[in-house]
């Protein structure tokens, strides 16, 4: 299961009713934050979610509306007496950028580990899920992220009994662990009792980019696709191309192409105060389009 919440849906500058870009996902006791614009802490507190389980922060790129809230968040974590290490993932130059921002948060009671993405595509395994970063097309180096929660095959008690596997080993085998019986020396492997892998969960997050081939490829079959819809006004198309952002219409076309289950739009231009005005147009292209707003959340669950 993945709990996901948009903490900020604004681009460029905050508005009284719209904070800057950020998203949080909770997975099995840990939390992943993508981007940390101004207002991230405020919306998370409104939601009532804790900062303590955040153990990974992903940065898409180094524009201020995506990373400006980081020093304050680090200070809040430090003031809460956090001691567990924090991993921050982002483009090359991340260590330099984070250390520069930490000039105003120099003394923290926990370690900050910076992991710089070295490839156009790079996968990380952590905290029971997989995270894939992929390059998109913005004015500076920028990455989208796919979060994947795999699901093992169904446990078969009949096979476990047939193999004479003691009951005390069933649970670790069900979790995918290899176990050895200390009394007999027999080794038991998950494939002895598990069926084929079942469909897991996939969440893809993309912002600050023109449409490019990597996006539908990486978002393919996502349960939730969160994508920038910077502009809805047709006359803003030239702006979108010049500054390498995306129109709402283009985001919907990508969602269709990638065959995602649901699209959440985010990262709206300050000039677009009522993005839902384009709902009819968007849903004509992709019916399962939702116009995101600060604090909007959902629970993604496994199919039965």
Image (cartoon, rainbow, N blue to C red):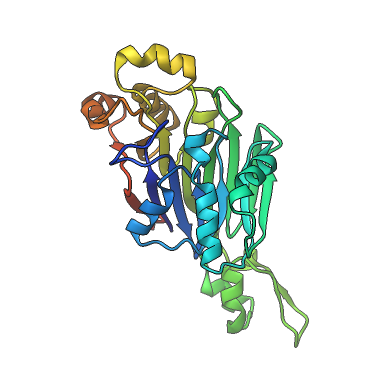
Vertical placement of residue 16 versus 251, above or below: below
Tally of numbered tags:
0
Residue depicted at x 24% and y 26%:
278
Residue depicted at x 47% and y 50%:
201
Q: In which quarter of the image is residue 22?
A: top left
- The extreme right residue here reads 185
Q: Quadrant of residue 270?
A: top left
Q: Is residue 102 visible?
A: no
- The extreme front residue here reads 104
Vertical placement of residue 96 versus 282, above or below: below
**Could you say where residue 236 lies in the image, as x and y percent from the top left?**
35, 15
**Could you say where residue 233 lies in the image, as x and y percent from the top left?**
29, 18
User: In screen coordinates, is 63 left or right of 289?
Assistant: right
User: In screen coordinates, is 245 left or right of 177?
Assistant: left
Q: For this rendering, which residue is in front, 295 or 107?
A: 107
**Could you say where residue 257 lies in the image, as x and y percent from the top left?**
43, 27
Q: Can residue 58 be seen in this view?
A: yes
User: In screen coordinates, is 133 left or right of 4?
Assistant: right
Residue depicted at x 49% and y 26%:
209
Q: Check the picture and name the quadrant holding the N terminus.
A: bottom left
Q: In which quarter of the image is residue 167?
A: bottom right
**Could you say where residue 120 lies in the image, as x and y percent from the top left?**
66, 31
Residue depicted at x 63% and y 65%:
109
- The extreme bottom residue here reads 183
């Amino acid at each position: 299961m993945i709990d996901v919440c948009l903490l900020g849906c604004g681009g460029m500058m905050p508005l009284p009713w719209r904070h800057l870009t950020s998203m949080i996902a909770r997975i099995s006791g840990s939390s992943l934050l993508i981007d940390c614009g101004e207002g991230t802490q405020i919306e998370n507190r409104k939601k009532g979610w804790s900062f303590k389980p955040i153990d990974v922060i992903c940065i898409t790129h180094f524009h201020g509306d995506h990373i400006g809230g980081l020093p304050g968040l680090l200070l809040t974590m430090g003031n809460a007496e956090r001691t567990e290490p924090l991993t921050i993932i982002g483009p090359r130059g991340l260590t330099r950028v984070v250390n520069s921002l930490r000039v105003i948060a120099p003394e923290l009671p926990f370690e900050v580990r910076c992991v710089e993405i070295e490839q156009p595509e790079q996968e990380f395994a952590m905290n029971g899920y997989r995270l894939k970063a992929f390059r998109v097309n913005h004015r500076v180096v920028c990455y989208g992220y796919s979060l994947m929660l795999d699901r093992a095959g169904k446990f078969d008690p009949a096979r476990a009994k047939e193999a004479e596997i003691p009951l005390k080993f069933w649970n670790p085998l069900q979790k995918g662990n290899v176990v050895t019986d200390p009394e007999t020396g027999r080794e038991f492997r998950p494939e002895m009792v598990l069926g084929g892998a079942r469909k897991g969960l996939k969440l893809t997050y993309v912002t600050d980019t023109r449409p490019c081939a990597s996006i539908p490829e990486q978002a393919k079959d996502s349960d939730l696709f969160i994508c920038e819809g910077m502009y809805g006004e047709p006359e803003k198309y030239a702006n979108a191309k010049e500054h390498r952002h995306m129109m709402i219409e283009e985001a919907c076309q990508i969602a269709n192409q990638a065959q995602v289950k649901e699209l959440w739009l985010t990262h709206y231009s300050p000039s677009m105060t009522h993005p839902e005005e384009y709902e009819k147009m968007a849903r004509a292209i992709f019916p399962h389009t939702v116009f995101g707003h600060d604090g909007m959340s959902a629970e993604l669950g496994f199919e039965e």
